[in-house]
Image (cartoon, coloured by chain):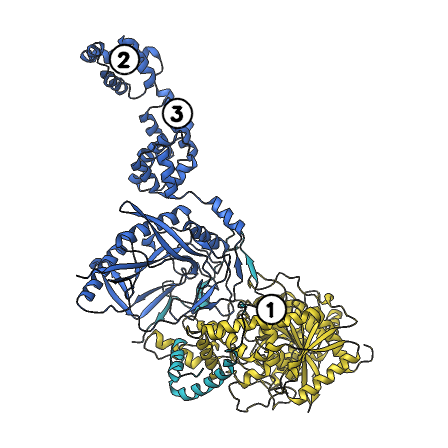
Chain colours: A yellow, B cyan, C blue
Amino acid sequence: MKNLLDLELKKINQMLKEGVIMPIDLVEEFAKKVVASDLNAFITLNLDEARKQARLLEKKEVDNILFGIPIAVKDNIVLQGVPTTCGSKILENYISVFDATVVKKLKEKNMIIVGKTNMDEFAMGGTGETSYFGPTKNPLNKNFSPGGSSSGSAAAVAGGLTPLALGSDTGGSIREPAAFCGLVGLNPTYGRISRYGLVAFASSLDQIGPMSRNVIENAHLFAAINGPSDDDLNTSSEKPFSVDDITKKEKYRIAIPRFCLTKIINADVVSVFLNCLDKIKAAGHQVDFVEVPFMKYAIPLYQVIALAEASSNLLRFDGIKYGYQTENYQDYDDFVTKTRTAGFGTEVKRRIMVGTYVLSSENVDVYYKKALQVRRELTDEIKAVFQQYDLIMTPATVSTSLILGKKREPNESFLQDLLAIPFSMSGHPSLVMPADKIDNMPIGVQIAGRYYDEKTIYAFALELEALVRGDESV
Amino acid sequence: MAVKKEKIRHVSKLCKIDIEDNLDKYYQEFSIIMESVDKILNVDVDKDMLITPNQSINRFYKNESCQNLKTIDVKKVFGKLEKGYHVFKRWQK
Amino acid sequence: MRVYKPTIGMEIHAELKTEGKMFSNAPNCFSAKPNINVNLIDIALPGTLPQLNHEAIELALKAALALNCKINKKMHFDRKNYFYLDLPKGYQITQHNTPIGYDGYIEIEIGGKRKKIAIECVHIEEDTCKSIHEDDKTYLDYNRAGIPLIEIVTKPVIESAEEVKLYLTKVREILRYLDVSDVKMEEGSMRCEANVSISDTNKLGTKVEIKNVGSISYVVSAIEYETKRQKEILSSGGQIKSQTRRYVENKKKTELLREKEGKNDYRYFPESDLPLVEISEEDIMRIKEAMPILPDQLYNKYQQAGINEPTIKAILSSRELAAFFEEIYDQKTAPIAAKYLVSGVLKYLNKHGLTLKETKLTAKDFNELIKQAELNDQQIQAILENLLLGKGSLKENLKQIKEGSISNEDEILTIINEVMAENKKEVASYRDGNERVLKYLMGQIMKKSKGKIDPQKAHQLLLSQLS
């Protein structure tokens, strides 16, 4: 089997330009690889359409680095004419009649969408195990979870099926799987990328983002999909990011919340992180510990805000308009109840109930409104750090990859996101990239930046990537 | 705040999820999550709510109606229509 | 005997006259065909996000200002969550915490006294889809889903069915004048709900809600019935239950729709898919300045110009007519213009069941016509009818009248002499000093000439012939 898809994008691009290979070669290689794979990374393959598109591209000029590149898209992002299941029984047979804005942008760049990736049901989970379509395996060790909820996207890239994938992140759903699969994943500034066509989990937290094998390819994909759009009124009119904006700085001022050293974080993870900081310091950058006291509320904050919003966003799945419908019922109430009870999985139902509970009239002030106040306080704290520092760094996750098939406590699915959630709450961009390995499983670090300052994150991440590799030249 | 079983039953009705068969299991798991959630109950903050992170503001500008009015063929979504209507059968005969 | 006093709060829903829907860019227009004006957002397809219609905000702002409300200069939208067949998203986007207008009022006149009806708030929301239940089937039409509405909520301050009637009429008149809504209750573009309670103390009694009543007179009748019903229950020692009731038109009574056991919990919370909306002082000023004069103000203005009351009322009965009148309004010509507007135009419209827009009459022509001093009443009415029908331009009509008119002095004298010969008794009477017969003789002359003589000229010549 040829291994074109394992090459760097730059190399593939060059070969496409020289006519040594055609887009169809990439699609066929993907098709072979995916059939041979037992990762369960995809819920739906889009091969016929991908082949058709690859053939059409043969008549076009190779005009950008993403041209003809196969990409995997998380199955909560809609693609016209193809099922969008969100990893749920309730949408098992739902076919979208429109393209998400990011999908349109991928098509504008002549990328080829080869399939829809497996995920935790409605993006609720951190291991991929809540998917109605079964768990996804970690390509680095198939006994492990690739993380979640963008499990299939992470597995597709880490498993060499596609060079790039789109995921979505509400409280770590891109970053945690990126960490567990040794990938680069970005959760952009809130409002950078149109959410139109992303099936909503928690509207004020959800973001679509790129997943890739390295930093620069991540930046290329981010550049292709970011920018304001009329269809999502929360997108910012800020100048869109372009790869040319990345400029290297001599010295970065980096803040480390002291909370990162809390006992909750696995000792191995902390030691990898501290080791990484030593390299950064040695390269001449300023690294200081700072206090961000409200970080400790990340998980309850997320449980209130994300689940409250989810309980409302998932009301539309009543079986009346689309999706799974129950067959035996007595009246409208019975129909909806039976449809939802059978259509949603346990994790989703539990989360909907918690969200409903915290929004109920007797609780909305003590939980929900309080959470929005705490959210502002945490945001203000993070903003204050960015007044003096270019970047904030933390470990990416609480532990290393998780073994598949273990029984998990209800709070466990939230725990890994302890350090990712604060930046989802404040809307700051943050990127996860691999720092080292323990027992052959990767450990990631998280780099957060100021609003709309992804370029500084990328610039530093490029340098860190080289440091981790042990390049002499940096 | 301790959650009562009755309350969970009520909540499940609001979100139309039937939990009767697994009430004890749901009750237990729900309670565990609420224990974690309760950590924000006593946080001392006195700030405005933050609704979205960028709290984007849309300046109301002058009389501008929705641009490019668009419609879709509803039949494509629902598959079939009856006399132009989407039909729900309220009970089965 | 105990005296039970009713306390009533009203909720009015009015559809806004916008081009597009509130949170989607599907058209907002009436269609008899179902599911025509629908887009992806209206049927809540997964992945869709709401849009925001600024035209609707503008109209809501107008209404809130006309209802003397304070304005929330920074507002957000909220979600009201509940399941129903007609609610595609499972929540309605509305304004719970920051209604566009609050603390307003309007004045009504009752028993010769003015009374302020306090308005709690005016908020923007979206309509649900239309559902028709037939046997075991529910037919869903998403045309209505997402149409912008304003809801106007009073405080519980209304004390009688008569006050409700005056209040509703007044609000309807205001909304019609502002051109923010069609306010047609029969078509559902205005809908009312009444909350009625009665009590013999200062404490409010148990509230009963009466939903979606089809016309103002039905609302009055429903409230009268409901007040009576509640009095009877309390007088016989019973208790009022918190209920939602509906009005049954042919029975002229209210019937139980459902008991309100345990309030529905709508879990209101801020809609984070939509940005905050900021309304500036300049926006408020701009809208205030561009706002049409409201009926109350017009009434005073017309009265001062010397127009009589029935005429004023007739003009103000139609927003279109009043707007037309305002377009050509000039204090000097106002009484004469008002007269022709009512005796000519309105009469014609009523007779043929037309609106002004459906005729060919322009304000400019009308204004020019009534200023034609040489035309008599009959001629003006005749031309007016031609203009309404679109028979010839004003210029052509005037030309025709002039050509048809007898301007030759000899011809006029011939007619005058004929009339004098036919009415010798009256001529003699005039010459004896009875000047009143002059009017009679003039009438005969105009009749004989079929109105083709300029009356002023004829009057002059008649005087000289008589002397």
Q: Residues within 10 Å of mark 2 (few under 14, many from 20)?
A: many
Image location (x, y in percent) of residue C432: 20, 9
- The residue to which callout 1 is attached is A190
Quadrant into which the N terminus of chain A falls:
bottom right
Q: Say which amino acid is labelled 2.
A: Ile
Question: For the residues marked 2 and 1, what is the alpha-carbon distance in whole angstroms?
Answer: 92 Å
Tag 3, which chain? Answer: C
In contact (CB < 8 Å): disc 2 and disc 1: no
Q: Residues within 10 Å of mark 3 (few under 14, many from 20)?
A: few
Q: Nearer the viewer, residue C37 or B28?
A: B28
- The residue to which callout 2 is attached is C416
Where disc 1 sits, the SS reads loop
Quadrant into which the C terminus of chain A falls:
bottom right
- The residue to which callout 3 is attached is C372
Image location (x, y in percent) of residue A144: 61, 89
Q: Say which amino acid is labelled 3.
A: Gln
From the viewer's perspective, is the residue at label 3 or at label 1 nearer?
1
Tag 2, which chain? Answer: C
From the viewer's perspective, is the residue at label 2 or at label 1 nearer?
1
